[in-house]
Amino acid sequence: MMRVPAVAGTFYPNDEEQVISMLAGFEKRARPEEIPGKVIGVIVPHAGYIYSGLTAMYSYRALSRSQSRDFLIIGPNHNGYPSYSAVYPEGVWLTPLGRARVDEDLARDLCTKSRNIVSDKLAHAMEHSIEVQVPFLQYLFGDDFSFVPVAMGDQGPQASEELYRSISALRRDVVLIASSDFTHYEPHEVVVKKDMELIERIIDLDIEGFYRTLRARGVTACGYGPIAVLMHITAELGGRMKLLHHSTSGEASGDMNATVGYGSVVAYL
């Protein structure tokens, strides 16, 4: 089973040399602080590389220090359907950098943990939030990694807690990649203010406050469920979270009136 890319040529180049050149440029510019512990997960954006690629690279530079090469990439299902968490079950994902292998055993095991975690490759066919992460992993690790893609439909508190408990029950040393952009289509200053309020809740591992801030402040982060899952896991393990980089699309496009926020956050022990 092979998933062909849905957004190569739009969100990122459909050419190996161009992708490598772009990622190498981000790598040179991204200078994250030293992480004082074992990296267990990251929050990364999933917009077009020209807008969010540099911010994403901050997380991936931190991730490159991880000893594990097994990744669980959780992104939002932007279609909102199906409502369950859809796991891509097997095979490979094709990108301009080659083939990336899905960990079939881990995917199968995860699907046994809850009736709301379902093997479903069709839910991933056009979803970009996970696809855009794969070339970063290929750039850093070549073919020396495997991953399991999970697209969350329902991202509410109960769904995120259920997915977190299911992942915790795997008893595997997997690194979690939570894919999310932050506030959408507001002026740069508004986006920065709203995003930082939400990121404070993330850093504090305040899950109730995180969901409350989403509602009360109208923060339109699209992958809030994956973020909450990582917060749960970090709290359970006694870890910490740290902001590495924040930007908005306006910094790349020059349009400061309708911007999208991007954050790079690392979770570590």
Image (spheres, helix red, strand yellow):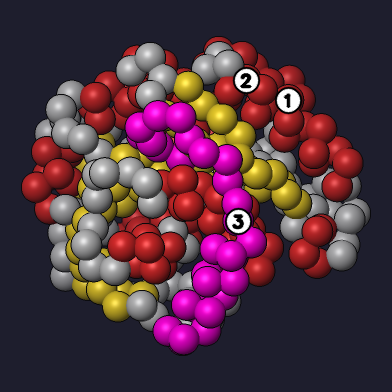
Label pair 2/1, CB-CB below 8 angstroms: yes
Residue for badge 3: 30
Front label number (3 vs 2): 3
Q: Tag 1 or tag 3, which sits nearer the N-term?
A: 3
- Neighbor class of circle 3 (other Cα within 10 Å; few <14, some 14-19, many 20+) is many
Query: How many numbered marks appear?
Result: 3
Residue for badge 2: 201
In this image, 25 relative to 266: left or right? right
Q: Does residue 79 show up?
A: no
Q: Please tell me which residue is depicted at 72% across the width and 34% down the height of the picture.
A: 195
Residue for badge 1: 197
Whole-percent x and y of residue 208? 55, 13
The amino acid type, in three-letter code, at marker 1 is Glu
Q: Tag 2 or tag 3, which sits nearer the N-term?
A: 3
How much space separates mark 3 and mark 2, taking CA atoms? 24 Å
The amino acid type, in three-letter code, at marker 2 is Arg
- 59 vs 132: above or below: above
Whole-percent x and y of residue 164? 32, 26
How much space separates mark 2 and mark 1, taking CA atoms? 7 Å
22 inside magenta stretch: yes
> Which SS class for mark 2?
helix
Q: Which residues are magenta?
A: 15-42
Q: Please tell me which residue is depicted at 86% across the width and 38% down the height of the picture.
A: 190
- Which quadrant does the C terminus fall into? top left
Front label number (3 vs 1): 3
